[in-house]
Amino acid sequence: MAIVNSIFTWYMKKRVHQIELFMKYPHDVQEEWFQKLISSAEDTEWGEKYDYRTIETPKQFKERVPLQNYDTLKPYIERMLKGEQNILWPTEIKWFAKSSGTTSDRSKFIPVSEESLQECHFKGGKDMLSIFCNNRPDNEIFTGKGLVLGGSHQINQLNEDSFYGDLSAVLIKNLPMWAEYYRTPNISIALMENYEEKMEKMAEATIKENVTNIAGVPTWTIVLAKKVLEITGKANLLEVWPNLELYIHGAVNFKPYREQFKELIPCNHMYYLETYNASEGFFGIQDEVDSDELLLMLDYGIYYEFLPFEKLDDENPDTLTLEQVELNKNYAIIISTNGGLWRYMIGDTVQFTSLSPYRIRITGRTKHFINAFGEEVIIDNAEQAICKACDATGAVFKDYTACPIYFKGEEVGGHEWIIEFDHQPNDFELFIDVLDQTLREVNSDYDAKRFKDMALRRPKVHNAPNNTFYNWLKSKGKLGGQHKVPRLANDRKYVEEILPLMK
C-alpha cells in the first residue's frame, strides 16, 4: 500500500502547477471561462432568449441578463425535471442536487451536468487532496480509507431519465471505481434516509476499517465520533483509527468546534482542511496550513460576480467583477456555471482576505442576519462573539440561533439567543456579557444601538437543554448533513418554534 500511496501522492501533486497558474493569471482564466460558457449555451433556449451569440463582454452580459435566484429559474428547472433538454445548458441534464435549507420549506433542485460533475465537483475533490499532498508530502492517507458522511437522501427517480438526491448522494452515485474503493462505509449505509439508524450503522461498519481521513459537517461528525467511542469504549478516535491524519470539513464555521475535535483527536499532527462546496458548485479550498482563508478556485467552469452587501435590496444593482473587489467588504456571490445557472445568487456572503491570489472567508448568508434595528449583525459577527464568550468561560457550544426582540410599549428592542452547550460556561452571566461586548467591538452599528440601552438592551440568552436543536430538526424531518440550524434570523419564527421544546 505504501507504493500505491506514493503514486497517488505524486499524481495529486501534479495538479498543483495548474492551480498556481490560475493564482498567477486569475483575470485571464475568468475571462476564458466567461467566453466558453457563453459560447457553449448560445443555442440553448436561455441563450437564444438573451441572444448569447452577440454577447462579447461581461458588461454586455450584465446589461442583458438580469440577476437570478431559484424562484426566477424555477420554471425552467421544472421543465428540465420532466426531461426537457437544451433549456439552460446544451448537454443532457439527468441529475439534480436536491437542496433544502431550513430557510425554506420548498426544496430546490439544482441541475448537475456532466461538465459540472467532472470539471467542478470531482475536480474540487481531487484538488483538495492535491493541496493536502503538496502541504503534507509525508502523508499516508491512501494506505487506508476515507470515511465520508454522505447525505440523507437516496437517489430518487423522477422519470426514465432524471434522478435527484442531495449533492453528496449524487456524487457518491457517480464516483469512479477507484474512488469508491477508498471510501467507507458502503453505499447502502452512506445513503440511508434515517439519520439515527445511519449513525449506528456507520459506526459499526467503520470501526473495523483503517480510516485515515474523514469528510463531513462538524456537527454530524461529532455525533458519529461519540457513537464510535460509545460502541468501542475507547477514549478518543486515535485509539480506534491510529492512522487518522486528515479531516475535511465545510458548510459551517469550524472555529467553534475546534476544541471538541482536539478532545476527539488529541494529536498536534492532525490536518484540518476546509472546503467550500455547495449544490451549485465547488468554490473554495483552504490551501495554506497556517491560515483558514479559502483559495477561490477559478478554473471550475464558474464565472464569478460579486454584489456589495449594502446593495442587496437595490432594484437593478451593479455587480463587480473579480478585478473590482476590495478587501474586507461583504459581497454576495453571483455565479454563472457549466451546470446552466446564469447570474445566480447562491445566498452566501464572503469577504476577500487577499487579492493576490484571491482568497476569501465566508461571512454568512444573504438571508441569515439580524437587522431589525439597523444593527446589521451577520453570522461572522455572531461567531466571533460566541467564540470569545466560550474562551472566557471555558464553554464549548454545540449549536445556536438568534433573533430580534421587537419594541414593546416603553421597552426597547434586543436580541434573543438560544444556545446549546457541550460544556457549560463556568459563569453564564459573564458569558452573556462577553458575547454582548464582543458584538459591540466587531460591529459599530450594534455598538451604536447598544449605547445606554437606547435602542438595544443586553441580549437575552437561553441555555438550551441537551439535544434541543436535534429534536427541533427531527420534528421538522430535517435530520441530515445538508440541514443546518439557521444561526441568525430577522424574524422570530425559529426561536418561537424551539422555545416550547425546552420546557
Image (cartoon, helix red, strand yellow):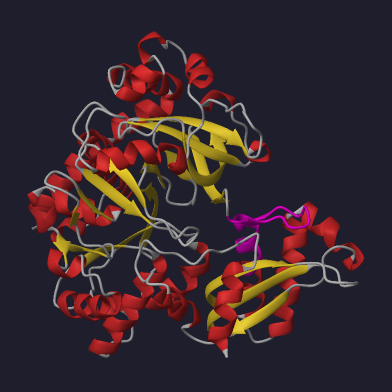
Number of disc labels = 0
Depth order, front residue of 420/257: 420
Residue 456: % across, % down: 82, 65
Q: Can residue 211 be seen in this view?
A: yes
Percent across and percent down for residue 198 are 24, 75
For the residue pair 83 and 343, the one nearer the viewer reads as: 83
User: Which quadrant of the figure has residue 480?
Assistant: bottom left
- Which sits in the foreground, 312 or 207? 312
164 in magenta:
no
Residue at x 15%, y 46% (from the top left corner): 8
Q: In which quarter of the image is the C terminus?
A: bottom right
Query: What residue appears at the point 19 percent right and 57 percent down from the top-left corner?
Result: 155
Query: In the image, what residue occupies the spot 43% across and 25% down?
Result: 26
Q: Magenta segment range?
A: 368-386
Indicate whether 47 appears above or below 486.
above
Horizontal arrangement in the rendering, residue 242 relative to residue 431 (left or right): left
Quarter residue 392 falls in: bottom right
The image shows residue 40 at horizontal and vertical percentages of: 28, 20
Rendered position, 207 above or below 76: below
- Residue 186 appears in the rendering: no
Closer to the camera in the image, 182 or 38: 38
Residue 66 x, y percent position in the rendering: 51, 27
Q: Magenta includes 380?
A: yes
- Seen at 74% across and 83% down, the residue is 429
Quarter in which the N terminus is drawn: bottom left
Is residue 326 left or right of 429 when viewed as pictured? Answer: left
Relative vertical location of residue 502 with respect to residue 83 in this rendering, above or below = below
